[in-house]
Image (cartoon, grey):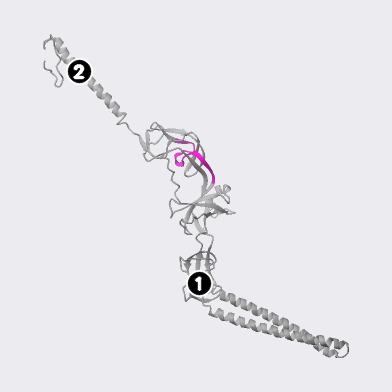
């Protein structure tokens, strides 16, 4: 029997004719049931695909896993600090002279005591020679005065006994005494002249020594203000030198933080020219007063000495710097990035594909990390992109593949 419906096999009709009511009922009812079954199966497949393959993934968010690590309590400078050096000087001369040599140029390194500049020593050398000759003459005068004094003393000692015996007149005795006293005075004067001449020798030698400028410490020439052949006068700077390894940072702290900062605390320093690099330091000075020049922004100046390694880069004096003073730290504690914490009391955790609000208790915290003392477990995933549109409790979310427990980015330098 041929089916009246294309693609649907004909039903056998045993003992029935095509015109009988029973045959017409079978021909119309059986294909309808089959189509209903097919449609129901298609609906089931669509529903399964909708909740598996085509299921909405939710909002893609940045996330970080709760991990264990170190959390510090720190304060930072309110304005950019400045790298400085403990040893920096502008060198000049104490007498006028013409420059004849500058052995060290800009950028040259030197050791303490090295000659950095020479003046023409001719005049000073002549002065020293003259002073030495005068000192020698003064020594000869002392020898002569000493001999005269000895002779006068001998004459007096010879005449005095004779005068007692009446063999010498009182006038002769008085004359001998006068000569003796005069000889003694001449000897004293000659000694004083000799001492003065020796002092002149020392002054002339010092004048000659001052025709050279020597390094007061180990360092480098940072600036030169004169050239060979120029005249240099007292008070006029000739060279600027500095020690690039005696570095410190001077930085202002907000007055609200000054009660917790004291000398000896550890610190960290970051510099804009060296992104990603940190220098260890320690507080060496806390100013004894608050700077109130700008009354709306009162600050306290602190100084931290940099700990420089033998192979690391040397920051340049004058570079801007950021300082973190470490007040306290906790090791091996649960922590999350600080920007994942909302109002210091809750976070959004990812649980079964949805954002779930969790109340937490925090401990120490800084710009990077916040210690979690309760409310989260190690390995929980918390959302860090809280400002993304649609991110709220109950929202469907999923973490970016790149999300991890990587260190939180540090605060941008001022």
Q: Position of residue 222 (x, y in %)?
A: 47, 65
Q: Which residues are magenta?
A: 327-347
* Most common secondary structure along the magenta stretch: strand
Residue 300 appears in the rendering: no
What numbered label is drawn on residue 333?
none
Residue 208 appears in the rendering: yes
What numbered label is drawn on residue 117?
1
Q: Which residue is mark 2?
A: 32
Taking the image as shown, residue 26 lies to the left or right of residue 341, namely left
Task: Work out whether 73 lies above or below 243.
Answer: above
Q: Position of residue 41 (x, y in %)?
A: 25, 22
Dividing the picture into quarters, in which one does residue 380 lie? top left
Q: Position of residue 196 (x, y in %)?
A: 66, 79
Taking the image as shown, residue 175 lies to the left or right of residue 83, namely right
**In this view of the protein, which residue sits in the foreground, 61 or 289?**
61
**In this view of the protein, which residue sits in the foreground, 336 or 77?**
336
Q: Residue furthest right?
A: 165
Q: For the residues marked 2 and 1, what is the alpha-carbon distance in whole angstroms?
A: 113 Å
């Amino acid at each position: 029997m041929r089916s009246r419906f294309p693609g649907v096999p004909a039903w056998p009709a045993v003992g029935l004719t095509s015109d009988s009511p029973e045959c017409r009922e079978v021909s119309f009812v059986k294909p309808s049931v089959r189509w209903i079954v097919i449609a129901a199966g298609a609906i089931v497949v669509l529903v399964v695909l909708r909740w598996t393959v085509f299921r909405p993934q939710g909002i893609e968010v940045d996330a970080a896993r709760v991990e264990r690590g170190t959390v510090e309590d720190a304060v930072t400078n309110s304005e950019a600090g400045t790298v400085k050096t403990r040893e920096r000087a502008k060198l000049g001369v104490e007498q006028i002279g013409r420059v004849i040599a500058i052995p060290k140029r800009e950028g040259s390194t030197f050791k303490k005591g090295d000659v950095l500049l020479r003046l023409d020593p001719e005049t000073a050398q002549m002065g020293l020679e003259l002073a030495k000759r005068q000192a020698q003459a003064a020594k000869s005068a002392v020898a002569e005065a000493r001999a005269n004094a000895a002779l006068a003393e001998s004459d007096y000692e010879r005449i005095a006994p004779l005068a007692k015996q009446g063999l010498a007149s009182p006038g002769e005795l008085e004359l001998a005494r006068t000569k003796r006293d005069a000889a003694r005075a001449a000897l004293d004067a000659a000694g004083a002249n000799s001492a003065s001449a020796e002092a002149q020798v020392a002054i002339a030698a010092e004048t000659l020594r001052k025709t050279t400028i020597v390094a007061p410490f180990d360092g480098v020439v940072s600036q030169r203000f004169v050239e060979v052949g120029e005249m240099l006068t007292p008070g006029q700077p000739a060279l600027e030198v500095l020690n690039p390894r005696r570095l410190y940072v001077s930085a202002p702290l907000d007055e609200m933080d000054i009660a917790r900062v004291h000398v000896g605390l550890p610190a960290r320093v970051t510099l804009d020219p060296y992104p990603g690099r940190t220098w260890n330091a320690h507080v060496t000075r806390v100013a004894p007063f608050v700077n109130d020049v700008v009354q709306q922004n009162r600050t306290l100046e602190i100084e931290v000495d940099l700990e420089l390694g033998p192979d690391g880069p040397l920051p340049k004096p004058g570079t801007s710097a950021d300082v973190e003073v470490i007040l306290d730290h906790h090791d091996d504690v649960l922590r999350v990035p600080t920007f994942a914490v909302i109002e210091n009391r809750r976070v959004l955790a990812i649980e079964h594909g949805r954002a779930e609000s969790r109340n937490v208790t925090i401990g120490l915290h800084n710009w990077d990390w916040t210690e979690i003392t309760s409310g989260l477990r190690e390995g929980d995933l918390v959302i860090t992109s809280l400002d993304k549109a649609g991110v709220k409790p109950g929202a469907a979310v999923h973490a970016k593949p790149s999300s991890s427990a990587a260190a939180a980015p540090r605060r941008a330098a001022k």
